[in-house]
Amino acid sequence: MRQQGFSLIELVVTMAVLVSVATIAIPAFQASIGNAQIRTVAESIHSGLQQARMEAIKRNARVKFTLQTNGAWQIGCMTPTTTCPTTITQKSAMEGSSSNTTVAPDNTTAVFSGFGTRDPATPVGLSVVNITNAQVRNEERRALRVLLAAGGNVKVCDPTVTTLGDTRAC
């Protein structure tokens, strides 16, 4: 009579292979998740700045984008009216990021004029936001930067890319 099932040796070898694969795969997944969180926060800030610019053009009013250090942001009118409220929209910090994601802006606010440019009446405003994640090792980290030009254009770039002509370069 023939027995079916696994021998103890087969089980031990299978477990050893699974442990080896998990030891290699888990750190790679953690780096991938951390880098995805960086990208999510960068795209959220990029989207918020573009939305603030479009609201300024649409309402023909000065619209302010306010960024918090945890990645949350808010858009509102500088001079509230019935057609231009104090808070137009906002985004929570918990959407797509983690406590390991660091947002480092050069300033916390950007004001857009009715033409969609950065408001010239606001001399100091947000122009650079660096986003990183402490959970990811330096050699695997894909930190990103959001740049806001004087003309109101917003760009997400990679500060480590230095090749001329590469669209990812800052």
Image (spheres, rainbow, N blue to C red):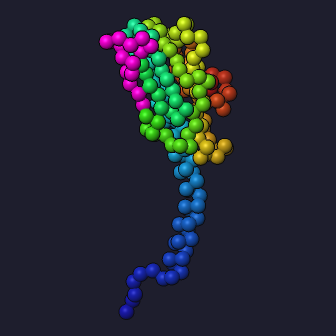
In the displayed structure, 112 sits above or below 27; it is: above
Vertically, is 2 above or below 151?
below
Q: Residue at x 38, y 13 (%)?
A: 80
Is residue 68 among the parts visible in the rendering?
Answer: yes
Does any portion of residue 167 appear in the rendered image? no
Q: Which quadrant would residue 106 be assigned to in this image?
A: top right
Residue pictured at 54% horizontal, 7% vertical: 121
Residue 23 point in image, percent of width and height: 58, 61
Residue at the image position 55 percent from the left and 56 percent from the top: 26
Residue 89 falls inside the magenta stretch: yes
Is residue 58 in the magenta section?
no
Magenta segment, principal secondary structure?
loop
Q: Which span is picked out in magenta?
A: 77-91
In the rendered image, residue 119, in percent from the top left (x then y), is placed at 52, 9
Residue closest to the eye, 27 or 64: 64
Q: Position of residue 124 (x, y in %)?
A: 60, 14
Quadrant in which the C terminus appears: top right
Total marks drawn?
0
Residue 165 quadrant:
top right
Q: Position of residue 132 (x, y in %)?
A: 59, 37
The vertical placement of 123 against 139, above or below, is above
Locate the N terminus by quadrant.
Answer: bottom left
The furthest residue to the bottom: 1
Q: Residue at x 47, y 28 (%)?
A: 73
> Which of the 4 quarters of the picture holds residue 167?
top right
- Vertical position of residue 21 compared to residue 123: above or below: below
Residue situated in front as seen by the camera: 116 or 13: 116
